[in-house]
Image (cartoon, rainbow, N blue to C red):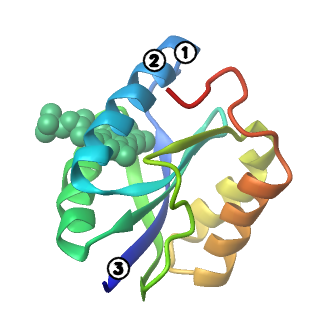
Amino acid sequence: MPLKRLIYVSRATMPATPHDLQRLHALSERSNRRQDITGALGFTGRYFIQCIEGRAEAVDALMARIDTDPRHAEVVVLCTLDTDKRHFDQWSMRYFDSHALDEDAHQAHQSGQRDPAQAQRLIDRMTQTLPPGGTLHRV
Ligand SMILES: Cc1cc2nc3c(=O)[nH]c(=O)nc-3n(C[C@H](O)[C@H](O)[C@H](O)COP(=O)(O)O)c2cc1C
């Protein structure tokens, strides 16, 4: 089945506590499971980095909600692509503590442009070089 993958970086508008992140993550997991959405979410302290994948209509509908969420602003979509394979097929939304990626996220956000290669690098670094979960684990 053709799928869509979207990666964005956005600026958090308020200091997100671990409790806030846990609630956001738990809600996202539940809701994404219903929509057959998979992906990953990272928080760097200043920025969110998120990869969302699923049927195009489901990804677009979710992005429309996320885009207007007051917990963040200046959502910069770094890449959208059609694919037939999920990157995070086991995870309705995997969470990564991504503080080590703050500067990279800042640069990608500042550029304000689509940059698929940079987007993929961010996701790869988020998933490969950092221990998954941090204080938050799959529910
Ligand atoms: C950084 C960030 C990432 C989010 N990721 C998701 C997600 O993966 N799935 C989801 O359902 N909601 C996610 N949300 C929450 C949505 O913006 C929205 O609050 C939620 O889907 C409920 O929408 P509704 O009140 O219109 O039903 C995210 C919010 C933020 C700030």
Which of discs 2 and 3 lies nearer the camera? The answer is 3
Circle 1 packing at 10 Å, graded few (<14), some (14-19), many (20+), is few
Q: Amino acid at mark 1?
A: Thr
Instruction: Name the quadrant containing residue 123.
Output: bottom right
- Asked if marks 2 and 1 touch (Cβ < 8 Å), the reply is yes
Task: Quickly name the residue at label 3.
Answer: 3
Q: Could you tell me which residue is drawn at 49 percent across and 79 percent down?
A: 85
Q: Is residue 69 visible?
A: no
At mark 1, the secondary structure is: loop
- Three-letter residue code for mark 3: Leu
- Residue labelled with disc 1: 17
Instruction: Name the residue carrying label 2.
Output: 20
Viewer-closest of 106 and 21: 21
Q: Can residue 133 be seen in this snapshot?
A: yes
Q: Is residue 100 left or right of residue 86?
A: right
Q: Nearer the viewer, residue 38 or 76?
A: 38
The quarter of the rendering in which ligand 1 is drawn is: top left
Residue 24, quarter of picture: top left
Disc 2 is placed on an element classified as: helix
Q: Position of residue 67 (x, y in %)?
A: 27, 52
Ligand 1 has an atom within 8 Å of the beta carbon of the residue at disc 2: no
Q: Quadrant of residue 25?
A: top left
- Residue at the image position 34 percent from the left and 57 percent from the top: 37
